[in-house]
Image (cartoon, grey):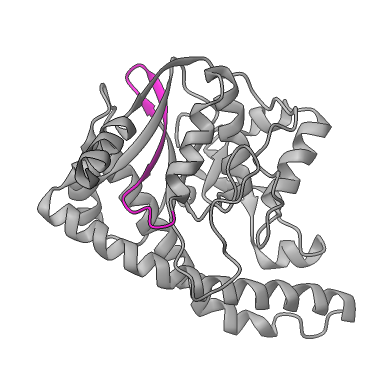
């Protein structure tokens, strides 16, 4: 986080309710202190340091353990955040008192949709987190599946995202999120600094609907320089825990900022072409290499069914 901070601050799309009410229910870019942005209260300091020390230090070569821990941290972070949001959602239903009818409608629609999504999301997250917990205790890091794009520089963004994608990069539906009783596949995406530059790591441990594998298959079909643009579309379309440097944001033209803002505000529903190439080139990142264990998993799966 400190790598992208300027004067101790980074930017993100804020879901601060007073700000949303002021802006017609829209998420807007806001400044946050780097210490607050990087704080995750799901673990005490001792447990956090002990659990994630392998990824808190600069990584020289990505391993199964690194990819597992990045995914586990993202799952824990989104689980804790959604728990807090769900607890607060019922209280925040009264924040529209005294506001104009149009503002009340916007806020209540947002809160109702958010609460329904949180209920389903927490159920799936609780289940998958339990499996991550078991693998962590047993140190079964090889159970993680990952696809990593290594860069030869540090990008002006970092993220730790856990989400349930419903479309791939070709515009195909890969799972349905319409029915709360249906369990959804969860993929994580982390952007971290390494000794060689940085890495974009997609990871998951369970793929019952095949959504994560299909998502990565569509990403792998793209040329490497197009994959980085696809990643930017993905993290702003589906991610909440995304932070970027003020100068990077200010350096984007109005059309690019508007396109990113539109993505960040599609919280409850995504169009089928949401991850397809829209021609926006928010940044140019240099790909140094690709690292993945997906082919090994595919071979193991084939042998297991033969």
Q: Is residue 52 left or right of residue 154?
A: left
Q: Quadrant of the C terminus?
A: top left
Q: Which residues are magenta?
A: 193-209
Can the viewer see residue 4?
Answer: no
Q: Nearer the viewer, residue 181 or 18?
A: 181
Q: Nearer the viewer, residue 9 or 159?
A: 159
Q: Is residue 196 left or right of residue 117?
A: left
The residue at the point 47 percent across, 22 percent down is: 154
Judge whether 54 appears above or below 79 on screen. Answer: above
Question: Residue 129, how many percent across, how many down?
Answer: 31, 62
Q: Is residue 204 magenta?
A: yes
The residue at the point 63 percent across, 47 percent down is: 237
Q: How many marks?
A: 0
Judge whether 236 appears above or below 86 on screen. Answer: above
Question: Residue 153, how many percent across, how many down?
Answer: 46, 17
Q: Quadrant of residue 56?
A: top left
Judge whether 109 appears above or below 16 on screen. Answer: below
Q: Nearer the viewer, residue 23 or 2?
A: 23
Can the viewer see residue 78?
Answer: yes
The residue at the point 66 percent across, 73 percent down is: 113
- Residue furthest out toward the left: 138
Q: Quadrant of the N terminus?
A: top left
Question: Residue 62, how many percent across, how many down?
Answer: 27, 28
Q: Is residue 213 magenta?
A: no
- Residue furthest out toward the front: 306
Q: Nearer the viewer, residue 57 or 263?
A: 263
Question: Residue 30, how many percent across, how many down?
Answer: 66, 48
The residue at the point 60 percent across, 48 percent down is: 167
């Amino acid at each position: 986080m400190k790598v992208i901070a300027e004067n101790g601050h980074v930017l993100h799309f804020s879901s601060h309710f007073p700000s949303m009410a002021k802006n017609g229910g829209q998420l807007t870019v806001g400044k946050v202190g780097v210490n607050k942005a990087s704080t995750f209260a799901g673990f005490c300091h001792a447990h956090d340091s002990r659990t994630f020390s392998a990824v808190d230090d600069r990584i020289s070569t990505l391993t199964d353990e690194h990819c597992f821990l990045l995914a586990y941290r993202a799952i824990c972070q989104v689980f804790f955040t959604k728990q807090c949001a769900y607890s607060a959602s019922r209280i925040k239903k009264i924040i529209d008192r005294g506001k104009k009818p149009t503002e009340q409608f916007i806020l209540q629609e947002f809160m109702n949709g958010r609460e329904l999504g949180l209920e389903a999301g927490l159920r799936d997250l609780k289940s998958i987190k339990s499996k991550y917990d078991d693998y962590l205790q047993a140190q079964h890091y090889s159970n993680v599946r990952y696809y990593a794009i290594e860069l030869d520089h540090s990008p002006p963004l970092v993220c730790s995202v856990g989400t349930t994608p419903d479309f791939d990069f070709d515009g195909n539906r890969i799972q349905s999120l319409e029915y709360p009783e249906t369990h959804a596949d969860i993929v994580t995406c982390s952007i971290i600094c390494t000794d060689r530059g940085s890495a974009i790591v997609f990871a998951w441990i369970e793929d019952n609907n095949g959504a994560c594998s299909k998502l990565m298959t569509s990403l792998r079909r793209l040329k490497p320089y197009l994959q980085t643009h696809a990643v930017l579309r993905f993290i702003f379309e589906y991610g909440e825990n995304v932070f970027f440097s003020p100068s990077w944001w200010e350096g984007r033209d109005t059309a690019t900022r508007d396109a990113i803002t539109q993505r960040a505000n599609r919280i409850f529903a995504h169009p089928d072409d949401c991850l397809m190439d829209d021609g926006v080139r928010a940044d140019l990142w240099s790909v140094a290499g690709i690292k993945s264990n997906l082919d090994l998993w595919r071979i193991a799966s084939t042998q297991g069914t033969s």
